[in-house]
Amino acid sequence: MNFPFSSVWQCLLSFLFRYSGRLAKSELTLNDQRTWLAYSLTLLFIPLFIVLLYALKYEMCSFSTGLQWFMLLPVVTTIYTVGSVFFGLSFRTSTFKKVLIALAPTLFFSLLTIRDLYIDPSLSFFHPVIGYFPGPMYDEWIPMFPSLYTYRLWIIALSLFLWGFTKLEKNKWPIFLLVLLPLFLRNQLNWHYSHQSIQKILRSSLQSKYTSVFFEGLDVVGTDAFGESMDFYIEHISKKLSLPLPTKKIKIYVYRGAYQKKKLTGTAETLVGNPIQGALHILPTEVSDTILVHELTHVIAAPMGIPILKLSPSISLLEGLATAMQPSHLDISIHEWAKAMMDLNKLPDIEQSLGAITFWKQNPVRVYFASGSFSKWLIDTYGIESFKKVYAWKNFEKTYQMSIQNLILEWKNFISTIKVSQANLDMADYFFNQKPFHEKQCVHEVAEQEMKFAICNKKTTDCNEFINRACELDPKNPALLLKRARYLYKQTLKPLDTAMIPLPSASGTRVQNNIMQLFHDDLHRSQNPQEVYNLSKYDHPSPALINTILTRMFLARNSKEVLEAIILGDYVPDTDLTWNTNDSNYNHAMLYFSKLAIKEKQAHKAIVFLDKIDLKNETDEFKLSYREIQAQALENLTSYSEAIEAYNKVSILSQSLGEKEFAEFQIQRLMYLLAN
Ligand SMILES: [Zn+2]
């Protein structure tokens, strides 16, 4: 028994009640009405019973959570529906009018919901019949915020009012206004958030040529360079799509974290670019993060979409275009992602993904990338104007004078000529191996526990119970097991029970197994550190992982204290510590420290560590990582010209299309910042 089940059942029930309400023509006494309500609520035991039977046979995720959803959704909806039916029946008029009156409150709330979705930021909503729509299903966490309880309590009060409406003799209208009062205070009651109320909560804002940025806390976005970078992206995308520049400022909301974002907008980790409202809802990130280009594309492409909704009716093309505009994702270009999927036999069926319903038969993440590559190829080969036609109307045959099957075949031929490195292939394997939400075990309950764990203050409280419960619910999830093992180790600093430590397995991907191996080595370093870390234990480690392991070896020989601190997290060594420059892994250690410094937003320190490195005898891969960190540090210090020089070197050293495209895109952006 869980959230989706409760939702589906209550829709069926409310339909049934309306139908039976329509048949009841005669006048009912109060006693009859009570019997009716009791009878309706009794009907609810049917699904409860089915679910319990199911639970006896299979495992149940969480009974108490399920029961709470059941009380909050179908039970309250039943009370509301019965209340509305009696409301209609209590008028002395024709049956047709009675039905209309009974439906009126629901109609009003439905129109209000449509208005809210169209005008206000939230993609989740409360509704008397539906109860609660939690927002797009990509988010695994479905919260039960206190506001849901107060809203459903209010719905019960409203139902009782509707029920007794015609029997009220005195003060009918004052009571009516009193009952409706919470609806006017819904922003204050946290039942709904308007643009203004969110802007008030986030407090700070800054303006750029094409955007208004709203945010809380200063670190990532509180600089003019953020707004100017957004302006650059907007001009770049508009030009690529040959669309006019936006005439109204795009609102960019940057939330503190997933919890706050879910509460205010109905989406947590899922970032949103809303073409109807010209607004972005994102989490803090680097200005160079290409996901910003993705979300801005959704907004700028509004004129390409169908009227009113301003988007493509095909999710696959909608997301395909936005993904195609990203110069790379995780340093891998969109065509490289597609080729990696082809090599891994994970390429989804593009034709099927174009349908509104058949889209969901595929793994959404794979569709995003495959459709991104397909869209980019269509635009590069046949031009943006043709793509605009299919984006809105999906008329491939008419637009391209070719069947969709042939287009896909041509695209596949093009993709098959691309070469993907082993490291990127491993990365893609790891990335695409994540199951879509509907295939995961107890996904909402696990997400609930993970969120509780994430917001739990680990310095002052024992947060064990949440992560333990998550592991209990999904015991075969290696990422969860690793998260728990890391937390336990940091808390106790004692060797863990071996059963607690997830180990590399044949079914795991290479990247995942290597992560496990490193954790395992970290745990066992106290006995004999020199012998624990050994590159040969890892299966095709990526350049970043090689750097990590060589640094571990360096520290095991030279500073066990720093090794310990780094393993426990968030530690950047002091720049004035003296290190053994004769150690063969010295350069690797300095590079690793500079990465830690960047992660902790200490660009000055990063530069000092980089300056300690002698690049002369290093490999191209090493030099590439060096230049990437250098570019980022220099940009953070607003030394744009020098950052451009570093990106130029990245572009020359790059070993994949993605790295090259990313570097060149950053050069253009930094030149824009310099010119403004
Ligand atoms: Zn998107």
Image (spheres, helix red, strand yellow):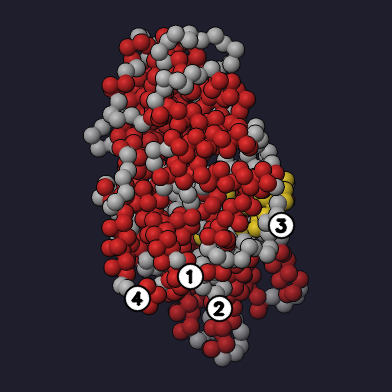
Measured in 3D between alpha carbons, the distance from the residue under mark 4 to the one under mark 3, in whole angstroms, is 48 Å
Measured in 3D between alpha carbons, the distance from the residue under mark 3 to the one under mark 2, in whole angstroms, is 32 Å
Indicate the position of residue 581 as horizontal and vertical percent values. 48, 10
> Disc 1 on helix, strand or loop?
helix
Q: Earlier in the sequence, mark 1 or mark 2?
A: 2
Indicate the position of residue 261 as horizontal and vertical percent values. 58, 48
Label 4, residues with CA under 10 Å away: few <14, some 14-19, many ≥20: few
Of tags 3 and 1, the one toward the viewer is: 1
Which residue is found at the position 62% from the left and 36% from the top? 641
Measured in 3D between alpha carbons, the distance from the residue under mark 4 to the one under mark 1, in whole angstroms, is 14 Å
Q: Earlier in the sequence, mark 3 or mark 2?
A: 2
Could you tell me the amino acid type at mark 1?
Answer: Glu
Of tags 1 and 2, the one toward the viewer is: 1
Which residue was labeled with disc 4?
A: 401
Rendering quarter of residue 544:
top left
Could you tell me the amino acid type at mark 3?
Answer: Gln
Which residue was labeled with disc 1?
A: 385
Which residue is found at the position 40% from the left and 30% from the top? 621
Indicate the position of residue 341 as horizontal and vertical percent values. 31, 49
Could you tell me the amino acid type at mark 4?
Answer: Gln
Whether label 4 touches label 3, CB < 8 Å: no
Whether label 3 touches label 2, CB < 8 Å: no
Rendering quarter of residue 330:
top left
Q: Nearer the viewer, residue 585 or 501?
A: 585
> Disc 4 on helix, strand or loop?
loop
Label 1, residues with CA under 10 Å away: few <14, some 14-19, many ≥20: some
Which residue is found at the position 55% from the left and 65% from the top? 242
